[in-house]
Every structure is written in structure tokens, then in C-alpha cells.
Image: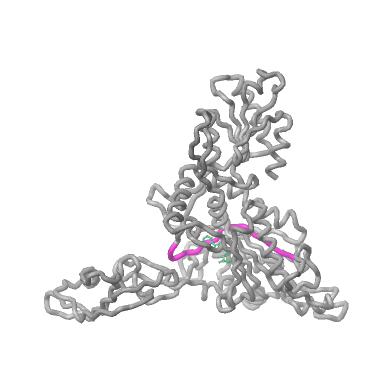
Amino acid sequence: MSEPKSNELMEKIVSLCKRRGFIFQSSEIYGGLNGFWDYGPLGAELKRNIKELWWRSMTQLRDDVVGLEATIIMHPRIWEASGHTSTFSDPMVDCLLTKKRFRADQIEPQSGLAYHYSGAKAEDGSLHSQPYSVLVAPGKPPESARKAARLFYEQRGIKVQELVGETGEKVENTTRYNPENGSLLTEARAFNLMFKTYVGPVESEENLAYLRPETAQAIFAQFKNLLDVSRQKVPFGICQIGKAFRNEINPRNFTFRSREFEQMELEYFIKPDDVVEQAAGSLARLQADTDLSTPQPNWGWEVWHKYWVEQRIRWYESIGLPRSAFEEYWQKKEELAHYAKATVDLLYKFPFGTQELEGIAARGDFDLAQHQKFSGKSMEVFDEQAKAKGRRAHYLPHVIEPSAGVDRLILALICHAYHEEQAPDEKGNLEWRVVLKFHPRVAPIKVAVFPLLKNRPELVEKAQAVREWLRPHLSVFYDEAGAIGRRYRRQDEAGTPFGVTIDFDTLGETPALKDTVTLRDRDSMKQERVPIAELLSRLLERIR
Ligand code: GAP
């Protein structure tokens, strides 16, 4: 899709999200707060469905993963051990004119004529020798640069009589200037992304704490407790869903880069390769034809890593995002985080670009080793069988970490589901409809129930009875307002996969159709006649 079309599409999606109550800007009545988003009724249901499906796939449908729900604020030493206090930063630059802040690595390279000034002479004759530069697009006159330079010196309290030492220089592919106004930027400085707070009433250094920037570290810090209580043996995993906070320099692309968001993370602990080799007598390395369907005792970390990449793609497929919607990006050696042996980013083709939805990293024993060092508590596991055989019995497990963002996934699901298409109205005339083609598993509302007419009490009574009957099993929405076609369209926009209409045949006008309803499929718009007695099983079969 070409650039303007993508922007147009994103605008439509953002507007639909607000109009239909999926996502609102946080604190909107006060002008909003950049990087924070609230989920409305449909968004909240969608979010719950996604988290429940992830949790179920990780914990209830597997024997080897247990869950954790840890606090957001933890001991600050955790972030020292993990490296977040020293290295969790982005390079930041400020516009010298407007003070607007940018992430240095996100500035698009520009070319043009850079006008440099060595200073400015003030009206009182004094000379101020602070250098300043402005980038002007090719072919543009220098006046705009001079205007910006005067403003720069005036902001510093100088009543400018004249600019001093103007020179022009052709520059190419520079990232030193504000792309919005051409002003020189500050040198890049590291900006730590963790939000700070204080625990207790005194705002002192020793009471400093952080809002967690990832859920993963709680899992490492609680590793020993979880190992003891779960009676799991390596290989096994611990997963968590929860809020994470990052003071992003430039939140952007709707919810894609937010300052408060949710993660779904699994830390899957495996034996180091040498322990596997000792215990199993061989080590399986990743081959093009490795069968990844069932874990084997001789799998080395590369095979486990690829296994989890595959598991995660399959899970996305199960909620309606096909494999073809993704790109697998295997990070190059020089791109890897200091702790990672390998990382695969699952990239989704968002309208604003192909971007990371989930990262699956092989983290070695970095985290457990760091917490062992910083806490002084052993994080090693003990293998009795290995001891009995006279082999290495104590070791630090290694980790494979699939880490997904809930909010990014919601955005991907909405983008993927969004369709505009022509459909016939009740009179057969074609009209445009907006439809969210969510997989029934994630759809916020599973079925809408409509009486054909709201002014016929017998229809309303029957429709309400059907709603009450379905309600304990599915999320049901009852709607009696407006023409039936309009009601269908409203549910199409909400992504409701099924619509049930109670009409006069339901009441027995055609005796053979008594106690049947029409069941409408959102995507094909086809309607079938279904006995009420079979409705629930038909729906459940298509939703589960
Ligand atoms: N524990 C590893 C970790 O946190 P990450 O790549 O920084 O890795 C994992 O984050 C996932 O969390 C990302 O793939 C993304 O889905 C989500 N995520 C990260 N930063 C985010 C942000 N600012 N806004 C929304 N989601 C974010």
C-alpha cells in the first residue's frame, strides 16, 4: 500500500476505535496525555479475550508452564542486576529552537544547505558568540534560516542587531537538524526510559523505585520460589501478563509505542547445552528438517528457540493472524542485546510500516547469573539423576523468552480485521460497509440478538428470552433500535461474528419454522434458519 493510503487507513482505524469505543486517548477532557490510552467497552473485551487465550495456551493447555502475577514496583536492585539502570536508555536530542525532543535514531536523514552562524551582535554593540545552524531545503532562500537564527539568539535574551559569520554548506543525509523546522539539535544524550517513583513518604535517593519496564525480571527474581512450589523440572516455563512502563521519548503510531502498556511474557528455562549432552548422550542442533512438533530431551538451545518461534506463530494463526501477515526477522550479531545469543522479531505489516509485534530471545543464563551475583542467593538447580550418575548436578538454566505486547497485538488485530466493502442493503442496493473481521475467538461480542421489530412485544419477549439463554455461555449484545439492516451494520463495525434475528416465523407464522431463528454470518452475510434448540451448540462450535 502506498504511503498516503496507509496514513488514510490509519486515520480511519483510529477514528473507528474512538467512535465505537475500542480505544480512547487517556485524560482526553484535559487535552490527553501523550503515550497513554484507555480501552472502552469493546476494547476492554477484546483485550480480556486476548489475554485469556494467551494464558490458556501457555498454562492450561501445557503441563510445563506455570503462571506468576508479581508487583509492578520491585526492589530497585532488580534493575541494577538486570542492567536496566545503566543501559535501558535511548539516545535523545532536543531542538535548540522549540525544545521538542526526538529519539536520535528515529530522525530521517535529510539533505540541503546548512547555514552556520558564529554568533550575533546585539543592539547595544555586544557580541554573543554561541554558534548555531539551520538546515534549509535545496533551492530555498536563506531568509528562513536567518529568521530561525534571530529567534534562537532572541530566545537567549539578545536584542539582535545582526547575525555574525554566516556561511553556507551543502550537507547530505544528516540527522543533526529538526526535520520539522530545520533548527540544529543538541548532541545525543542517553535518556533512561524507566519511570521513577518513591516508596514511602520521603523522596530520598534510598527510597527511589521504578515502575517495571518489563514483566520478565519478576520471573527471574522469583525463580527459586516458583521452582520449589511448582515441582517442575527443567525444561519448564514461567509466564506472566502485566503492565509495563517506559518513558518513551516519542510515543507514536497510535498505541504502537506507548508509555504504559501490557506485556505477555514467558521465560522458558532449559538445560545448558553441555548438561543436555551429558544427560542425553547427544545434542540436537537445529537442522532444516528438525521436527519441532514434540520437545525432545536432547534439544539444544537453538532447537528450543526455533520451537518457540513456531509455537508463537501457530498461536497467532489460532486467533486469526495468518503466517503470511508476519515477517520473521533474525537479528544480526551486531544488533543483539548484550545478553542475547539470538533474537527473532515477529514483525507485523501495520499500515504505518512493518514493525515488531513480539520478540523471541535466547537469553542464555544472563538474568539468573546476574540475580545470583547481585542478591548473593543461588539460582542454580540441582539434578538428582545427574548426581546419581556422577555427572554435573548443579547448573544455571538458560532461557528462551517469547515476549509479546498486548496493545500492539490489539492494534494488529484491528488493522487486520478492518475491511471496507460493498454490500446490498435490505432493498438490494449496494452500499459501503465497514466490517471488522475478527476471528470469533477474539471478537469482543460473539453474538447479537435482534427482534425484527421493537414495537411487537411478542418478538421482543422471545428475543430477550434467547438472549438470557445464550448469556451464560457467550458475550451477547441485544439491540432493538432502528431498521434491522442498520443494526447489522453496527455489529459489523464492532466485529460481532454472528447475528440472530427473531421474526414472525420464530413465533410460528409459518408453522414449520416455529422456534427457529435466522443466523447471520458477519463475513459472508449469508443467513440460515436454525432451530433455537441448536443455536448454542452451532455458535460454540464456530467460536471455540
Ligand atoms: N523482556 C523483553 C522485552 O521487554 P521488548 O522487545 O523490549 O522485550 C517486548 O518488549 C514486547 O513488548 C515488544 O515486542 C512489544 O510488543 C511490547 N512493547 C515494548 N515496548 C512497547 C511500547 N513502548 N509500547 C507498546 N508495546 C511495547
What span is in magenta? 236-250
The quadrant in which the C terminus is found is top right
Residue 182 drawn in magenta:
no
**Image point (72%, 75%), residue name:** 396
Depth check: 332 or 2 in front?
Answer: 2
Q: Main secondary structure of the magenta part?
A: strand
In the picture, residue 374 is in which quadrant?
Answer: bottom right
Q: Position of residue 399 (x, y in %)?
A: 68, 71
Q: Is residue 15 above or below residue 519?
A: below
Q: Inspect this view and state whether residue 154 appears.
A: no
- Whether residue 364 appears in this view of the structure is yes
At x 48%, y 53%, the residue is 37
State the residue in front, 519 or 177.
519
Task: Name the residue rendered at 84%, 78% in the picture.
Answer: 281
Please name whichever residue, 513 or 398, is drawn nearer the observer in this view of the structure: 513
Ligand 1 image position (quadrant):
bottom right
Name the spot of residue 18 as percent of width and height, x first.
Answer: 46, 46
Total marks in image: 0
Decide: is 417 above or below 177: above
Name the outermost residue toward the left: 124
